[in-house]
Every structure is written in structure tokens, then in C-alpha cells.
Image (spheres, grey):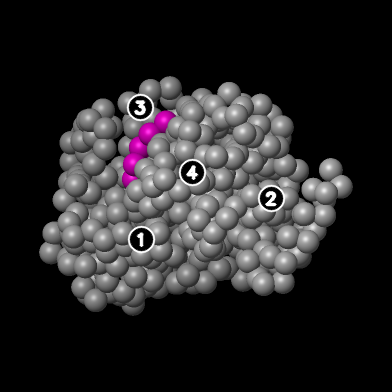
Amino acid sequence: MTYRQAMDYIEELGKLGSVMGLASMENLCEKLGNPQQDLSFIHIAGTNGKGSVLAFLSEILKAAGYRTGRYLSPVIFEYRERMQVNGKNISQKDLCRLMTDMKEICQELIKEGRPQPTAFEVETAMAFQYFKEKNCQIVVLETGMGGLLDATNIIPSPLVTVFTAIGFDHMKVLGGTLKEIAQNKAGIMKPGTLAAALKGEREVMEVLEGKAKELKVPLYTADPAQARGIRRSPGKQVFSYKNYKNITIRLGGVYQIDNAVLALTAAELLKQAGFPIPEKAVYQGFASALWPGRFQVLGKDPCFIADGAHNWQGAVRLRESLQFYFTNRRIIYIIGVLRDKDQDKILQELCPLASQVLTIPTKGERGLSSYELAVKAKEYHDNVSALDSVQEAVELAYLLADKDTVITAFGSLSYLGELIKVVEKCTAPEGRKDIRRDSHGKQREN
């Protein structure tokens, strides 16, 4: 199987959508010899912040000298980001070899009268096999959706179970109330694990505490309110927490202190679980962690921010960050949102801050056209334009901006990889000249 064939195969499987449950994962992993049984895990569930916590913990473990696997979704730049060892993406050769094996296993299962596994199930089982082959000492594993019936939940009791901020998302699958969503995510807790949770809504904490008590799992709460000495800038933040002083992180967004405090709590639990982590590795890991598309500064004069806010909770945190860093600054939005997200709550939360809203289309079966999104946005803002592409939106945003403007792109992680590349091209000296020449020419023609 070539790389293109592997991508075509996983795209074909993607059309099957998501199927909650562990039956197919059990079938797949059994055919592989249950590689997940030979691995040690940190398992992360939550609505927002999973990727950032994964990035922090992966870098801390890497700095401590552990061979660390990380499994994440969605990706920003390319598919191979899903499976990494010590921050290095799986090679095309390994991916093609493993995907060929997975396709043969799926064909065997179908011949046996069993269901065709979904794309996420195939990817997850393949990741377990890859991490076993690479002799990973520990794997930082992010759930796909929910927890209890998520494909990743086939693993044995993890060393540490981590719960990031839990809010409203995927309600059609996970439940319509905060309690139901929390119960689903709490399903990754297993006997014998240690658990860390970000302090959140009382309703959420009651669910997590109840599940921990039922399973006799020690649950430790990370409280961002106890962080002190906080110094913030869009590209760097410094904070102290408990015995750690002046930890530096390079992720912007006021919400990242929450994620860092949670990651620090989880790192302390790893020590209890038998994975010594020197204090130096904690500082080094936090300082080196990067996570594209999370309040990422892509350019200056004007400032260009890319943020993965794709649900109401993410929109609230993005608004808080914009108001904190850019009080009274003119803001231009570029927004692309998937069809199954609550566009109204996102737009209602963020549109009042903007002077101009530019909408773009999102791709795939869950995609939403820029026109449809613009119609919704006009309910919350008077100055909305629907654009045909990311390229067009970025060029127009630069034309409309002066050096004090803040351009902010958000709504879905699915387009941020393309956006980051477009902005990099546009911010090159020759790129900015082309924007001014070409776009002004078009305006004169109109």
C-alpha cells in the first residue's frame, strides 16, 4: 500500500462515521495480539484542553528520559501527526505497512461476519501496535469522543486518568445535560488508576467524585485559582503552583494556565505510579511544549491569532483571552465552523467583539458553507462577508487591517493547518506586496 492508497483507505472508512462501543476494537486488537495490554498509559478525556494537556505531559516525560508515545486528534498539518514517538511523527513507511495490515484484518473480520471497523477504530488499534513496536515506555492517549464507549477505552487501567474542562459538545451522542456528558467521560476511570481533574462545575465534580469513590480511585483536583505570580503575554506565560515557582509555558490564551496546572498535577501522580520525574524535566517540558492552533500568534503588525475554539466553552475562553490581551483593539474574525457544532452559541459569544466578520467554508460531510455561516452570523453582527476560501479570507483580512488590528481565526481545527501555511506565505515580504497589488486591483474592478 502506498501512502496515497493508505490515505484513500482511511478516507473511505471515514465515510462510515462514528460507532460508539468497544466490540470492533476488541475484534481488531485480538487479531493484533492485544498490543494495548503491553503498554502503560495516561488517558485524557474532556471537552476542551485535551490536546494542550497531552502536549505538556508528553514533553515533560520526554525531558525525563522516557520513550513517550502520543496519540491525538484532530491533526493540524498532516495525518501522520496522529501517532508520534518523542514528538516525531510516524514515518510514511511504517504507516503504509501498518495500514496494509489493518486493511487485511478488516477484510478478515468482514468475512467472519463481523462489522467493518470505523476509521477511528482502525487508527487507534494501529497506534497501539506502533507504540508497542517502538517500545514506548508510556503512551499519552487522548480520547476521541466521550469516554465510556470511546475506542481508546479498550486499554487496561491507565497509570493516570486525566479530566480536562468538561462542557457541552457532541450532545447528540454524549447526552443533553452536563451530568450525562460528565458520566460518559468519567467512564475512562478504572480500578487501580490515579485520577486528576480540573476543578470545574459542581455538577461535573460530583459525577467524577462519585465515580472515583465507587471504584476506590484517588481523585486529585487541580485548582487554577491557586496559581500565583502569573505573568501573561500572547506568546509566553509564567506562573507558580504549589512547590513549583516560575514555570514558563509558550502557549498563549488565559485558559492555558488551567491546562498547565492540570498537567502538573498529573505529572505528580506519575511519580506515585512509579515514573520518577526530576524537577528539571518538569520545567523543561513545560517550556518546550508547543500546540499549533491554540491561541497561536501567527504574525504581528497586525497581530494574527489562530485558535481552535469550536464549541461554546471554547468560545468563552477565547473571548476572555481577547479581552485580556487586546482591550479596545479593533478585531477582525475569520470563522469556519462544522455543521454539527452549535454555531449560534459560538457566534453570540464572540461576534460582539468584532468590527468585521469573514466566514469561510469547512470541508467534508460535516462541512458548512461560508454562505450558511454568514446568514447565521448576520443575526449577531451587521458587518459579515462570506468568502470562498481560506486564502481569500486571509488576504481580505490583511487588506482591512491596520497595524493595531487583531485578526483572529477560529471555529474549527480542520482548516487551521491550511490557514497557518497561508499566513506564513502572506507575511513574507513578497507575499504582502502581492496581497496589496492583487486585491486592490480586484477592488477597483468591482
Query: Which element type, helix, strand or loop, lies under badge 1?
Result: strand
In the rendered structure, which segment of residues is drawn in magenta? Answer: 164-170
Residue that extends furthest to the right in the rendered view of this protein: 445
Q: Earlier in the sequence, mark 4 or mark 3?
A: 3
One can see residue 58 in this view: no
In the rendering, at what x and y percent does residue 182 appear? 34, 32
Judge whether residue 157 is colored magenta. Answer: no
Q: Are marks 1 and 4 in contact (CB under 8 Å)?
A: no
Task: For marks 3 and 1, give the CA distance.
Answer: 32 Å
Query: Which element type, helix, strand or loop, lies under badge 2?
Result: helix
Task: For marks 4 and 2, give the CA distance.
Answer: 22 Å
Residue underneath mark 4: 309
| Left or right, 337 with reference to 188 | right
What is the three-letter code of the residue carrying label 1? Ser
Nearer to us: label 4 or label 2: 2
- Give the quadrant of residue 17: top right
Mark 4 Cα-neighbour bin, 10 Å: few <14, some 14–19, many ≥20: many
The secondary structure making up most of the magenta span is loop
What is the three-letter code of the residue carrying label 3? Leu
Residue underneath mark 1: 233
Residue underneath mark 3: 178
Query: Which element type, helix, strand or loop, lies under badge 4?
Result: loop
Nearer to us: label 4 or label 3: 4
Task: For marks 2 and 1, give the CA distance.
Answer: 27 Å
Which of the labelled discs sits on residue 396, or is there none? Answer: 2
| Left or right, 229 with reference to 87 | left
